[in-house]
Amino acid sequence: MSDPADLYQLSPDSSGVPAGLPLVAALTGFADAGSTVAQITQYLGDTLDGDVVATFDADILLDYRARRPIITFDQDHIADFQASTLTLSLMKDEIGQQFLLLSGFEPDFRWEAFTSAVMQLVERYGVSTTTWVQAIPMPVPHTRPLGVTVSGNRVDLIESLSVWRPTTQAPANALHLVELRLSATGHPTAGFVLLVPHYLADTEFPDAAVTALSSISAATGLIFPSDRLREEGREFLSKVDEQVTGNQELTRLVQTLEERHDTYMEGNPLPSPLIGLDGQVPSADSIAAELEKFLSTRQVDDDGGPSLG
């Protein structure tokens, strides 16, 4: 078996990483409802200081045919080639606390080797805790706080924050395997899966990014700037509410989702928030179709916020 270190290259400054920092992992690729992971990785990169510690080999881990890199064509020649990246970076939060951020594409290949590589880096830098995030679409209303499902071995976080604890099977991503292997060693690990309203899953939903950052903060004590995202979220939801209020069918469907959500949260014996009192999974296709029309007509206004146009 090849050395997992063959999958990544350390930067010249990698030896200067302090021991005992928390690791935050957020990889794009699978089931990123509300563009949650894409938003937070972009936001953290734009608002925080950081330096790359290790770069993973995309030629080994990435399926270029499935996720094509972007080129810039300038009139008669190729001016730029934007390769997908997967990096481990040393970051500072809003008050200067350091942490490690694993971000970029989710590997398509060699998951076991990638997991071993991450575990190797966790050991190398004496990582204190590992926290990762994902977001999936769920039939929940946008008028209620976003819920999360917490996995891993951080019992305190599971007990205090996990609102949905199903026993089920679902498609995996690479960080599920990382969590499984790290948890088996006793390393403190927590995974947050955000439950995003399914009719908003195909757009950038700022509140999902805010909830993701809040979840990471709860697990690590890190402080992240989120004022811009919160303001964008308020503007976005106000326009969704306008669309719903102007349509009786949408209003009724949102109310149905609210009733099911509230009943579940009150602790009544429902098997999951997906299932209504009649035992069926409501479709909500109508609300999805109507809001997709709304979202497709959004334009960016002069302030960068969404508008109906």
Image (cartoon, rainbow, N blue to C red):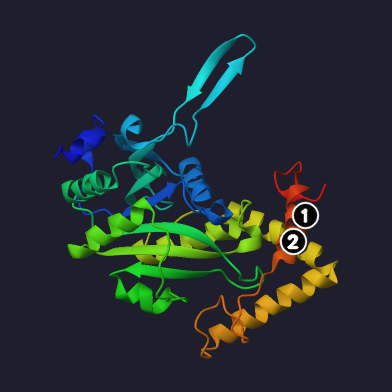
Label 2 crowd bin: few (<14), some (14–19), many (20+), radius 10 Å:
some
- Residue 54 position by quadrant: top left
In the depicted structure, whether residue 303 falls above or below residue 191: above
Label 1 crowd bin: few (<14), some (14–19), many (20+), radius 10 Å:
some
Q: Marks 1 and 2, how far apart in space? A: 8 Å
> Please, which residue is most extreme toward the top here?
76
Q: Which residue is mark 2?
A: 240
The amino acid pointed to by label 2 is: Val
**From the viewer's perspective, is the residue at label 1 or at label 2 nearer?**
1
Helix, strand or loop under label 1:
helix
Q: Which residue appears at 49% of the width and 51% of the height?
A: 37
Helix, strand or loop under label 2:
helix
**Dot 1 or dot 2, earlier in sequence:** 2
Q: Which residue appears at 29% of the width and 47% of the height?
A: 111
Q: Position of residue 38 (x, y in %)?
A: 51, 47
The amino acid pointed to by label 1 is: Phe
- Is 205 left, or right, of 65 in this rendering? right
Contact between marks 1 and 2 (CB within 8 A): the answer is yes
Q: Which residue is mark 1?
A: 294
- Is 80 left, or right, of 249 in this rendering? left
Q: The N terminus lies in which quarter of the figure?
A: top left
